[in-house]
């Protein structure tokens, strides 16, 4: 059985395989952003991350409406998905949600909550 270990360098996760002599070589670089604070009115560059998850902490005073963009300039409203897979046009409750990946993201509306964002492949 091949011994594989994971390590994080900066904000990127690396997968390493044992070479048989207790040394390791990288076999795959998995782009990953560990949970980090995000201000959703600022644009998040998620082009290299097909899987993007956010966590809203606290109840917002105004529901958040998210937008996505392929070029980072022209944004359109997009859906979010809750943990049960339900499609949401806006988010108004604390919890974890998925947003589209492989694009730029931001909120065009919303206030009063704190966010964490995590992205991976």
Image (tube, grey):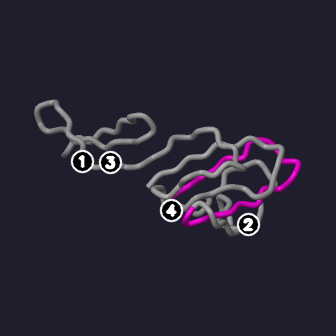
Picture coordinates of residue 15 (x, y %)? 31, 43
Alpha carbon of mark 4 to alpha carbon of mark 2: how far?
19 Å
Report the predominant secondary structure element of the magenta stretch: strand
User: What segment is highlighted magenta in the picture?
Assistant: 51-71
Helix, strand or loop at mark 2: strand
Q: Which residue is mark 2?
A: 88
Q: Nearer the viewer, residue 82 or 77?
A: 77
Q: Which mark is residue 103?
A: none
Q: In this view, which residue lies farthest toward the top?
A: 22
Q: If you read the primary sequence from the N terminus, does the residue marked by circle 4 or circle 1 appear first?
A: 1
Q: Nearer the viewer, residue 12 or 68?
A: 68
Q: Which residue is mark 4?
A: 102
Q: Nearer the viewer, mark 4 or mark 1?
A: 4
Q: If you read the primary sequence from the N terminus, does the residue marked by circle 2 or circle 3 appear first?
A: 3
Q: Which residue is mark 1?
A: 27
Alpha carbon of mark 4 to alpha carbon of mark 1: how far?
23 Å
Q: Which residue is at a point 24% across and 43% down the rendered structure image?
A: 26
Helix, strand or loop at mark 4: loop
Q: Which residue is mark 3?
A: 29
Are the residues at dot 3 and dot 1 in contact (C-beta closer than 8 Å)?
A: no
Local packing at callout 1 (Cα closer than 10 Å; few below 14, some 14-19, many 20+) is few
- Asked whether 63 falls inside the magenta stretch, the response is yes
Alpha carbon of mark 2 to alpha carbon of mark 1: how far?
38 Å
Local packing at callout 3 (Cα closer than 10 Å; few below 14, some 14-19, many 20+) is few
Helix, strand or loop at mark 3: strand
Q: In this view, which residue lies farthest toward the left?
A: 21
């Amino acid at each position: 059985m091949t011994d594989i270990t994971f390590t994080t360098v900066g904000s990127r996760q690396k997968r390493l395989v044992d070479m048989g002599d207790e040394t390791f070589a990288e076999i795959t670089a998995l782009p990953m952003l560990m949970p980090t604070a995000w201000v959703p009115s600022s644009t998040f560059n998620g082009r290299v991350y097909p899987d993007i998850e956010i966590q809203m902490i606290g109840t917002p005073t105004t529901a958040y409406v998210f937008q996505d963009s392929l070029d980072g300039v022209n944004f359109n409203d997009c859906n979010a998905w809750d943990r049960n897979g339900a499609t949401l046009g806006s988010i108004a409750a604390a919890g974890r949600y998925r947003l589209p990946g492989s694009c730029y993201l931001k909120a065009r509306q919303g206030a009063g909550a704190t966010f964490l964002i995590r992205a991976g492949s």
